[in-house]
Amino acid sequence: MTTPERHISRITIRAPLQDVWKELTKTDEVQKAMFNMQLHTDRLDVGGQVRMRSPNGKWTGVTGEITEWNPPHRYAHTFKFTNFDDPPCTVIYELREVAEGTEFTLTIDNLPVGTRTAKQMKSGSEMICKSLKSILEKGSLPFGTRLLYTLFKLLTPLTPKKCRSENWPIKAA
C-alpha cells in the first residue's frame, strides 16, 4: 500500500484575519471560494458533522467531521467526496496574521495517492486559495472561476444520484 501524501497551498490575503475566518466558516450563505457550495453542520466544533451542499441544498459534494476547532486560527475536518469511493483525507485551514494581512494555509493530509480525490484536491486547493484571496480583496471571484461555476450549474442534471443530499443527512446527536 502506498503511503498517503500531504499537499500544502499557501497564499497571503490583504484582509484581516477575522474576515478570512468568517468567510471560511460561514454557514448562512454560499462559500464562493469553496466551489460555490454551502457549509451545513450540526455545530462548528470538534465532532461537528460537515456537509458541503449545492446552493439549492439538493446535492452534497463533500462529507466530513470536524477534528480541530481553534477559532480564528485553525480548523480541520475529514473530507470525502460523495461521488468517489476513495478513502477520506483531512483538510486543515490555518490562518496567521502577517504584516500584509493574513497568511492562509490549506493543507490536505492523508491524501490517498493515485486517486481521483488526490487529483481533484491538488488542483482544487490552489483554486480555493486564489478564489478566497480574490473575494476578500476585490469582492468577486476570478473570471475563470465564474466560468467554471457556470459550467457546474449547466452540468447539474448529470450529477450522480448517490450525491443527493437525502443520502447524506446530518445525523441527530
Image (spheres, rainbow, N blue to C red):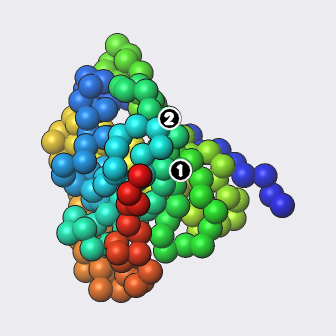
Single out the residue that lies furthest toward the left.
Answer: 139
Q: Residue 82 vs residue 147: left or right?
A: right
Judging depth in this view, the residue of 173 and 38 nearest the camera is: 173
Image coordinates of residue 165 in percent, x first then y, are 34, 72
Q: How far is the residue under mark 2 from the one under mark 1?
A: 10 Å
Mark 1 is surrounded, within 10 Å at the Cα level, by few (under 14), some (14 to 19) or many (20 or more) other residues, namely many
Image coordinates of residue 48 in percent, x first then y, are 42, 46
Q: Up-down: is 107 above or below 65?
A: above
Secondary structure beneath dot 1 equals: strand
The residue that mark 1 highlights is 78
Q: Amino acid at mark 1?
A: Thr
Mark 2 is surrounded, within 10 Å at the Cα level, by few (under 14), some (14 to 19) or many (20 or more) other residues, namely some
The residue that mark 2 highlights is 68
Evaluate whether residue 35 shows in this view. no
| Label ID, residue 14 | none
Single out the residue that lies furthest toward the right.
Answer: 1
The answer to whether marks 2 and 1 mark residues whose Cβ atoms lie closer than 8 Å is no
Q: Residue 78 vs residue 160: left or right?
A: right
Quadrant containing the N terminus is bottom right
Secondary structure beneath dot 2 equals: strand
Quarter-of-image position of residue 38 = bottom left
Q: Up-down: is 10 above or below 157?
A: above
Evaluate whether residue 133 shows in this view. yes
Residue drawn at x 64%, y 53% as measured from the top left = 111
Residue drawn at x 48%, y 50% as measured from the top left = 65
Q: Residue 63 vs residue 29: left or right?
A: right
Image coordinates of residue 125 in percent, x first then y, are 46, 49
Single out the residue that lies furthest toward the top.
Answer: 99
Q: Amino acid at mark 2?
A: Glu
Residue drawn at x 67%, y 58% as measured from the top left = 112
Q: Residue 88 vs residue 167: left or right?
A: right
